[in-house]
Amino acid sequence: MRRRGTPDGKEILQGMRGIDRLSPVPYYYQLQEALKQEIDAGSWRPGDLLPSEAELSEQFGISRTVIRQALDVLEADAQVRRVKGKGSFVAEPKLRYESAGAGDLVSAGRDLAAATISRVIEVQRSKAGDSLGALLTVESGRDVIEMTVVQSVHDVPVSLNRLFLRIDSSDAIESVVERGELPSLKVGESEILAQLALHYGVAVVRSDVTVEATLANKFETDLLGVEIRTPLFLLSSVVVGKDDATLGFMRSVVRCDYFRFSIRVDHSS
């Protein structure tokens, strides 16, 4: 690991762009952007100690107050963690959410890990109301399967998922319901859509996802291990199968201290 005062650390500092004193962008923002770029590029790795406030002040010719403002931003973004009396350390990178067919994958650096179900809260039959019926393209009052689970990555609870699944989403689901039973989900195995694909032949082609911000309520704090009113991502996903047929609708609250979302925008059309 690179540590403060090592030749590598000094080379990193010397290679960083300086502060543009004529720019209308505040000094602290310029500095946090420069540090963020080096962290994202891997110049400093998770667990590495960043240069001290004194070293940053000397290198960039700015006050420690400005440097603390920059570090405050990086800490709020969960890119550094500060330890009293020791300094600022590079934090573990956030997991990147990738929706891919029936499996939701997350990656951190080069490591790829699959989300797993860590707790099944409830599986039941329920009636679709007007709004849910419109999302699922079924009549209001139609029976659907409602599943509520907690999903984890590396044994850390990261999302609370509530899926409303059409009974005709697959032949196997219809068969289970006709027997008066409900589909089952296994704790410790792959995430909810992957299990439905594997065990019940629910052929998910894509999820159309809308991302919003929300604050954790009491139920979510107990399940995800966060404080009440902690910022979370709220994902509303229409689950789509072959021939653009709607299979289900899922609403998920996701810990934003563990995830970041990547979006590709096609400007060619």
Image: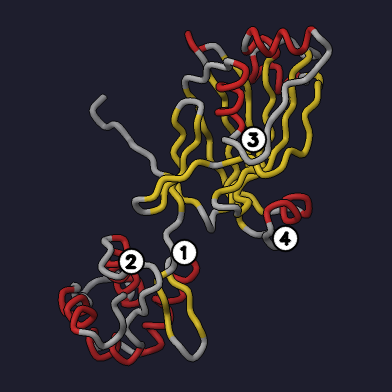
Q: Nearer the viewer, residue 55 or 111?
A: 111
Marks 3/1 in contact by CB < 8 Å: the verdict is no
Which residue is located at x 72 percent, y 8 percent?
A: 175
Q: Is residue 45 placed above or below 13 in the rendered structure?
A: above
Marks 3/4 in contact by CB < 8 Å: the verdict is no
The residue type indicated by label 1 comes to Asp
Q: Which mark is residue 118?
A: none
Q: CA distance from mark 3 to mark 1?
A: 24 Å
Q: Which mark is residue 77?
A: 1
Which residue is located at x 37 percent, y 89 percent?
A: 64
Q: Which mark is residue 36?
A: 2
Q: Considering the numbered disc 1 on the image, is that residue within a helix, a strand or a loop?
A: loop
- Residue pointed to by mark 3: 251
User: Which quarter of the figure is the N terminus placed in?
Assistant: bottom left
The residue type indicated by label 2 comes to Lys
Q: Residues within 10 Å of mark 1 (few under 14, many from 20)?
A: some
The residue type indicated by label 4 comes to Ile
Q: Residues within 10 Å of mark 3 (few under 14, many from 20)?
A: some
Q: Which mark is residue 228?
A: 4
